[in-house]
Image: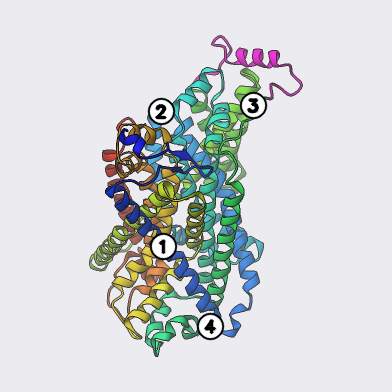
Amino acid sequence: MNRAAAHGAAPAADPGGVTALPAVAGGGDRAAAALARAGALLTVLVPMALITLLACQSATSPEGSATGLGALLVEVLCSAAIAVAVAAPVGAGAALFTTRIAPRRARRPLGALLDVLAAVPAVAYALLAAEPLTGGADGPARTVVRGLVLAVIVTPTIASGAREVFARVPSALVEASLALGATRWEMIRQVVLPSCARALRSMTALALSRALAEALALTVLLGGVRPDQLRAIPARAASRSDAWRLTRLADDDILGRLVLAALIIVLIDLAAGLSARALVAGRPPVRPRRARPGRGIPAELAALDRALDASPTAVRLPRWTGAVLVPACLLVAALLEALSSDGGPLGALIGGAFACLLVHPLLVLAVEGPRSAVDAGCRDLCAAAFALAVLPLVVLLARAAAPAGGTTPAAPLLGAVVGTLVTITAAIAVSVPVGLACAVWAAEYAECRAARIVSSLTDAAVSAPSLVAGLLALALRIVLVGPGRAPAAAGAVLALCALMIPYVARGAVQMLGLVPAALRWEALALGADRWRVILRVVLPTASAGLVSSTVLAVSRAIGAASLVLVVAGPVERPSPSALADWIAGAAAAGTAPGPWTGVLCLVAVVVALDLVGRAVAARIGPKDAA
């Protein structure tokens, strides 16, 4: 009997899109399974520790903490819902434009823009939108403004993941659809979107968890919580048991309200994730579409109409129509704004974009027909979604690069950069192996029910705000070291790991599930051991998506200013040890050039880590990947 037969039955794909390899056999397979199981246990410990901390802190919170909790939860949930409702179509449209609509030569540089967008930490956008966030808007207007800011923050989560998912659609299906006469949009609607529907829902759920965390942190921080004041909590503790009464030691009802709201949101996210995954577990990943040859039109006439529209002799607009129409619409809009004397560049840009989105499909409808008009309109919408996705990045870089009339001290900034690099490198060295081991266990070893539970727990951990991870680090410091002050470097690394491990594991599970099962079959048929299949086939094939998941996790962790301020150390320290600390101090001082130099350094650090990860992925990944 050959070695492939000794491995057991062939791999089978479960309804969740995760491919389970055959039973473990051999010493190497058992060791790999043990390592993967250990990573899964460590990953599950993070949400369990966060839930335990929130439950203990809620039980010992001050009596006035529940006051206004309902209004806080409503505002957080509404802000997160608005953010996801805006970010989901914008992120998916941007990903479609960079993978299926843009010219082939432009897809790689446009995809690089999305990578840079994913590398921008949330603290940069929060500083950019500081004026509208802290303005006089109240009630529903304030919720809408915060929802739009959160949409800018969570759009890279959907765009980056959807780009990797869309790129995994087999090219044979795409080419077959186009060869049968389908337009570009019909190919996307009939082939790309149904094949990626489950992955898109998973990315949207991850974005919702991230939006809940950022919305809660933003609402509470704007409500009066000062993370730098929480540094004194360890000094107030009289014994190790005070680690479970941090909200009472802080003597702040707002912090207690944050803990109660975070506990409720984490439990809601956990219950919703388990319920949703249980409901869709038995459904097929792609539902067959019923043939609808034409609404009231015989099938022969519908096929003839499609053939005439796709005929080479049909009338077509020149290829340069869009390149001429866009600047023409912008010029007309700018002239109208200039004549009105009460507009500005932003109004001209918005008016020109709407005019182009309206005029181009109508022009195509008049010349080429309805099918081509729908195709042109949908492609224009995807291009507009890409422009909306990268617009905050352009505004941020322009604001950061604008001269501010001052000089930045080099020594404190250099120390902050070095401290950030040391802290984030240590966190990456711990988080990436643990999260990746958990993903391998969930995608390759675990049963369907266990994989769903782990994914739901990681979603719940992602929905916890960064301040909660900082409180976890403080509680563990008091329990392990005792009350008083202690070196904060290990606490900062621990807190960043609590943020990054669930994010890395959640994204890696999704990317490993996209690896075709045929590759596993072929490797096993050649006699490879199971652990070699995972190490040399599965992980290299998903390397690009794994890098994207890691970059998103690093971006969230490195921009968690409130978290770093909690665990950074004594208040009287003469120089900051992290860029987030430096940015917060510069923003509080209000002197030129302010925090924007630190923001540029923060973005540069994450982009550099992204480039290193991409280079490694290109070296170990499949050479024939597009």
Front label number (2 vs 4): 4
**Residue behind mark 2:** 104
Q: Which residues are magenta?
A: 292-319
170 within the magenta span: no
Distance from Cα at disc 2 to Cα at disc 1: 36 Å
Depth check, front residue: 519 or 394: 519
Ranked by sequence position, the earlier of labels 2 and 1 is 2
**Residue behind mark 1:** 499
Q: Are marks 2 and 3 in contact (CB under 8 Å)?
A: no
Q: Residues within 10 Å of mark 3 (few under 14, many from 20)?
A: some
Is residue 576 at least partly visible in the picture?
no
Amino acid, disc 2: Arg
310 within the magenta span: yes
In the image, which disc is placed on residue 60?
4
Q: Residue at x 40, y 88 (%)?
A: 236
Amino acid, disc 3: Leu
Q: Position of residue 455 (x, y in %)?
A: 49, 54
Ranked by sequence position, the earlier of labels 3 and 4 is 4
Residue at disc 1, secondary structure: helix
Q: Quadrant of the N terminus?
A: top left
Ranked by sequence position, the earlier of labels 1 and 3 is 3
Q: Are marks 2 and 4 in contact (CB under 8 Å)?
A: no
Distance from Cα at disc 1 to Cα at disc 3: 49 Å
Q: Residue furthest front?
A: 1
* Colour basis: rainbow
Q: Residue at x 28, y 59 (%)?
A: 425
**Residue behind mark 3:** 362
Distance from Cα at disc 1 to Cα at disc 4: 24 Å
